[in-house]
Image (cartoon, rainbow, N blue to C red):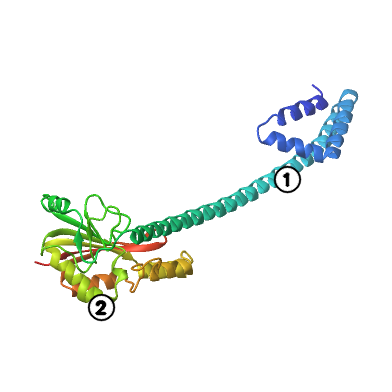
């Protein structure tokens, strides 16, 4: 086989190689003068081989090998350029993917905020269309009696709002759907030491510190049985400040969580707690086994903490 035919055969094989083939073909198209020079040189070389002696053949082969080496060097440069382009393209795609993820997160957060606002507006609408109770009232005495007779005892959800817990007796100052007792959190129409678990999620921040100490916590201690559990969930002041300083929480969201939505009476916040300050308040009010079971937990717009304690015997 002549060197010229060998060149064409090599070209035919290279352009069919996956990934490398298209790159090689583009390089050949951009550098046709090199290809033509190589082809002409090989044609001359074929002629010399056919018409010259052995030494002449060897010299011609060496010359053409030098030319081929230049071609290979150019091919390596083209491959290196292609690899650099691929690296830059991958980095650009990663940047766009990160930006898209940020946009999706922002959209989800905005949607969560709108859902929470819609829930508050719905609660306010229901409140204005119903006759508010003038005093604490048990709406379903039979259900209350049934829960008090359970083996696990009575579980309360105080300040349930529009999210009542079906496994608990739900208490709120508004007669919303699912509410079993309409009453303020500090005036519960229940006998002493009858509750085994009392949970209040995002409620303690709605009271001044003075009211929490003198009215709310004493009332909850009254209805809790000795050794019963108190579960409090509230915005985590320490985690939110850290998130805001780190750029993970906007100033608008921080202000909204700290001061409440303020869409209706009772939706105002008067105090904020870190896990440590809330645990200190419970200990000072006579609760024991005080512990923080979650801190900095993301919930909608805010970062929250959860603190548990027991009523001392």
User: In this rendering, does residue 267 appear at all?
Assistant: yes
Q: Residue furthest top?
A: 1
Q: CA distance from mark 2 to mark 1?
A: 76 Å
How packed mark 1 is, by other alpha carbons closer than 10 Å (few <14, some 14-19, many 20 or more), is few
Q: Residue furthest left?
A: 313
State the image coordinates of residue 186 (x, y, percent, origin top left): 21, 69
How packed mark 2 is, by other alpha carbons closer than 10 Å (few <14, some 14-19, many 20 or more), is few
Q: Which residue is mark 1?
A: 77
For label 1, the SS is: helix
Q: Nearer the viewer, mark 2 or mark 1?
A: 2
- Residue 309 or 20: which is nearer the viewer? 309
Give left or right: position of 217 versus 101: left
N-terminal-most mark, 2 or 1: 1
Residue 226 lies in what quarter of the image? bottom left
- Residue 125: image tag: none
Q: Which residue is mark 2?
A: 210
State the image coordinates of residue 124 (x, y, percent, origin top left): 37, 61
């Amino acid at each position: 086989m002549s060197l010229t035919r060998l060149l064409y055969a090599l070209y035919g094989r290279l352009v069919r190689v996956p990934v490398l083939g298209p790159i090689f073909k583009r390089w050949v198209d951009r550098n046709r003068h090199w290809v033509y020079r190589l082809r002409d040189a090989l044609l001359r070389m074929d002629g010399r081989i056919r018409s010259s002696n052995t030494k002449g053949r060897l010299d011609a082969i060496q010359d053409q090998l030098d030319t081929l080496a230049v071609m290979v060097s150019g091919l390596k440069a083209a491959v290196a350029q292609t690899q650099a382009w691929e690296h830059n393209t991958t980095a650009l795609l990663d940047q766009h993917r990160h930006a898209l993820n940020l946009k999706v997160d922002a959209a989800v957060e905005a949607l969560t905020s709108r859902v929470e606002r819609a829930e508050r507006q719905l609660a306010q609408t229901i409140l204005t269309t119903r006759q508010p109770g003038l005093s604490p009232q048990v709406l379903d005495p039979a259900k209350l009696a049934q829960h008090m007779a359970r083996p696990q005892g009575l579980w309360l959800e105080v300040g349930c709002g529009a999210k009542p817990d079906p496994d608990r007796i739900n208490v709120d100052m508004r007669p919303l759907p699912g509410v079993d007792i309409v009453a303020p959190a500090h005036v519960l129409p229940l006998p002493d030491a009858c509750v085994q678990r009392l949970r209040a999620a995002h409620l303690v921040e709605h009271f001044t510190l003075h009211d929490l100490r003198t009215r709310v916590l004493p009332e909850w201690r009254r209805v809790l049985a000795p050794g019963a559990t108190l579960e409090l969930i509230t915005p985590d002041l320490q985690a939110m400040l850290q998130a805001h300083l780190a750029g993970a929480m906007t100033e608008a969201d921080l202000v909204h969580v700290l001061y409440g939505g303020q869409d209706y009476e009772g939706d105002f916040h008067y105090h904020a707690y870190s896990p440590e300050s809330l645990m200190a308040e419970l200990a000072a009010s006579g609760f024991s086994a005080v512990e923080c079971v979650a801190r900095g937990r993301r919930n909608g717009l805010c970062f929250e903490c959860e603190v548990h304690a027991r009523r001392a015997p």
